[in-house]
């Protein structure tokens, strides 16, 4: 109840911010896009991380206005970023509760259409668990979003313990490989599990982002294994829009 009332107030009083974590092309180190991450700055309690409040509002009617706030802000920021680098892309996280709401589905579709975004400028990150719960509905939703020009990524790929058959049934653009796989990379080993994921992605024409790159060794190892894009504290921490714009200006 306290969290829910707090989020309501934060929406009304403008206490939410987005931070952006760059996604780099691992071959040349250039930023190609960024993931938008929600930050709640409470005047009294300080920063409250999304992991603390998103799961709670997922069961309330607040997930809808919060998702809409994130999407609107991300589209606004995307335009400033594309003014600096026209091919730049931004992704937002959409949680399972929002994915299955008609209002959210239609809101994102309309936003993408009316804002006249360049095609493929905005991506949506979804977890496999959230999608396979209602596969048929989900297929319709993703189809609609793709027709409106958005790209679809699977977030935390490899952690859902699901059959992979859904990959053939859903219109997906790419996989964000969960950071648990990156943590286990062995520069002297064969890394056969992650190599298999990369082969699968390539054969299905899916893009790949390796998440959670924290060390130079991990970065080099995953690049040599063939992942084109990477994200992680060892590359860049999430940062405010202004800092990301400075990064693109260099
Ligand atoms: O940024 P941080 O590492 O604290 O994020 C923790 C979790 O919160 C991650 O799983 C991330 O996907 C999720 N998250 C961050 N921003 C958003 C958002 O805008 N919407 C949703 N649904 N989840 C988010
Ligand atoms: O679930 P999702 O992948 O959306 O989670 C994104 C969260 O992961 C962000 O909140 C971000 O702060 C966090 N994150 C990003 N890079 C790293 C990293 O290198 N290590 C760890 N532990 N967390 C990271
Ligand atoms: Mn994500
Ligand atoms: Na992720």
Image (cartoon, grey):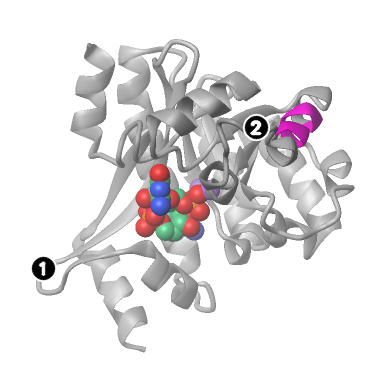
Label 1 with label 2: CB-CB less than 8 Å = no
x, y (%) of residue 90?
Answer: 45, 32
Q: Residue drawn at (45%, 77%), measured in percent from left and top?
A: 56
Establish if 87 lies above or below 229.
above
Q: Does the magenta portion include 198?
A: yes
Q: Nearer the viewer, residue 200 or 68?
A: 200
x, y (%) of residue 182?
Answer: 54, 42
The mark nearer the N terminus, 1 or 2, is 1
Q: Residue drawn at (35%, 43%), measured in percent from left and top?
A: 73
Establish if 211 lies above or below 50.
above
Q: Secondary structure at mark 2?
A: loop
Q: Residue drawn at (68%, 36%), measured in percent from left and top?
A: 191
User: Which label is found at residue 43?
Assistant: 1
Would you say residue 67 is visible in this rendering? no
Residue lying farthest front? 188
Name the magenta segment's main secondary structure: helix
Tell me if the residue at label 1 has its CB under 8 Å from ligand 1: no
Magenta range is: 195-200
Q: Which residue is mark 2?
A: 148
Q: Does the magenta portion include 33?
A: no
Q: Secondary structure at mark 1?
A: loop
Q: Nearer the viewer, residue 33 or 199?
A: 199
Would you say residue 97 is visible in this rendering? yes
Crowd class of label 1 (few under 14; some 14 to 19; many from 20; radius 10 Å): few
Q: Quadrant of the N terminus?
A: bottom left
Q: Residue drawn at (41%, 35%), measured in percent from left and top?
A: 75
Residue lying farthest left? 44
Q: Give the Cα separation between the discs numbered 1 and 2.
A: 38 Å
Quadrant of res 135:
bottom right
Q: Please state which of the two labelled residues, at mark 1 or mark 2, is closer to the viewer.
A: 1
x, y (%) of residue 237?
Answer: 30, 40
Quadrant of res 16:
bottom left
């Amino acid at each position: 109840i306290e969290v829910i009332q707090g989020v309501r107030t934060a929406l009304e009083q403008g206490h939410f911010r987005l931070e952006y974590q760059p996604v780099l092309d691992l071959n040349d180190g250039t930023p190609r896009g960024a993931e938008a991450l929600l930050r709640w700055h409470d005047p009294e309690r300080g920063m409250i991380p999304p992991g603390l409040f998103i799961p709670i509002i997922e069961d309330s009617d607040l997930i809808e206005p919060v998702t809409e706030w994130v999407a609107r802000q991300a589209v606004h920021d995307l335009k400033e970023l594309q003014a600096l680098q026209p091919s730049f892309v931004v992704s937002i996280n959409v949680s399972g509760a929002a994915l299955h709401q008609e209002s959210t589905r239609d809101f994102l579709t309309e936003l993408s259409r009316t804002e006249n975004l360049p095609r493929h400028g905005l991506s949506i990150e979804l977890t496999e668990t959230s999608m396979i719960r209602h596969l048929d509905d989900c297929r319709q939703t993703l189809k609609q979003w793709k027709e409106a020009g958005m790209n679809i990524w699977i977030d935390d790929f490899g952690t859902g313990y699901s059959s992979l058959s859904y990959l053939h049934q859903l219109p997906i653009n790419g996989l964000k490989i969960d950071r648990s796989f990156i943590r286990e990379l062995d520069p002297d080993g064969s890394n056969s599990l992650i190599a298999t994921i990369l082969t699968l992605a390539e054969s299905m024409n899916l893009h790949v982002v390796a998440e959670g790159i924290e060390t130079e060794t991990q970065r080099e190892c995953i690049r040599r294994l063939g992942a084109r894009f990477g994200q992680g504290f060892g590359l860049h921490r999430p940062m405010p829009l202004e800092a990301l714009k400075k990064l693109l200006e260099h």
